[in-house]
Image (spheres, rainbow, N blue to C red):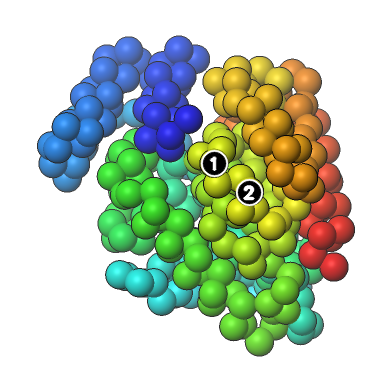
Amino acid sequence: MALNDYLRYEIIEEAELGYISTHERDRMLAVFDGIESGGDPRVDMASAISAQTTTGESPNSDSDFDPEVFTATVSAKGNQSDVSAYMAKPRKGSGLAAVVVIHENKGLTPHIQDVTRRLAREGFVAIAPDLLSRRGGTSQFSNPADATTALRDIPGQELVDDLMAVVSMLASDESVQPERIGVVGFCFGGGMAWRLVTQDSRIKAAVPFYGVNPNLKYVPNIKASVLAIYGELDERVNAGIDEITEAMEQGHKTFEKIIYPGAQHAFHNDTNPDRYHAEAARLAWQRTLAWLRLWLE
């Protein structure tokens, strides 16, 4: 499934689940279709979209000061523009493993920043790029639906280029061991994690959460050990599980998959009570940490 199709289906699914009205769905799809047909994506989205999605602070998030973790907003030098990113790392240590954290389709939210800090508390240098940097950054979009639409307007290869720029910055960080870099992505970010590992051999371990498959012809390029995480009720994304499993096995890749019973798409996001599955999220996080530690040693 193409990333653009994924973003479009996200809108349809949110309407089916009752998160947005059918009227809002139709307005949002009209904007998407306008982009696809060459329309101007920088229309007045406030009047075109009124999605009822929120990006609240994660219940587990820290205050601005954590005695164990240093955080900062940093900038990676990209080919065409700089990439803003949120970095969190242990206050002590060198030669550490590093993890790129790729956000959902609403941009770099407080929840993703919290996930980044969680990784830092586990001893990783973690960095969450803002893939809306080319459009002024997530903070420029007051409505999360605006951010989703803006992401669709950015070519997929440019998004991968921005991720690779962040990997390059990590590899040059004095606290990071360049041979120990991994990636974790959620929803849209899970799909981007798959695409990153097909193009960047520096990634040694990957954990895409409910991410849509990359183009299967590029699977032979993957060097990373991949743990793919899914929710049992996520029928749309799960439709691609057999194909990616077969492709990874035929390519003799290091690959495991886990499907959590009773969990739906985005079950790890603890700021979304409609989709959050506490037990599946807890178990998936434990497996994520174990996978990263195993393959980034």
Indicate the secondary structure of the residue bearing disc 1: helix
Residue pointed to by mark 1: 217
Question: How far across and down, in percent of the image, does residue 101 sit?
Answer: 60, 56
Indicate the secondary structure of the residue bearing disc 2: helix
Residue pointed to by mark 2: 220
Q: How many angstroms separate mark 2 from mark 1 (CA)?
A: 7 Å
Name the residue at 75% across, 37% down: 249
Q: Compared with residue 112, is residue 30 higher up or lower down, i.e. above or below?
A: above
Question: How far across and down, in percent of the image, does residue 153 sit?
Answer: 28, 44
Image position of 149 (left or right of 31): right
Quarter of the picture containing the C terminus is: bottom right
Q: Residues within 10 Å of mark 1 (few under 14, many from 20)?
A: few
Does the rendering let one see residue 92? Answer: no
Q: Are marks 2 and 1 in contact (CB under 8 Å)?
A: yes
Name the residue at 76% across, 84% down: 94
Does the rendering let one see residue 221? Answer: yes
Q: Residues within 10 Å of mark 2 (few under 14, many from 20)?
A: some
- The amino acid pointed to by label 2 is Pro
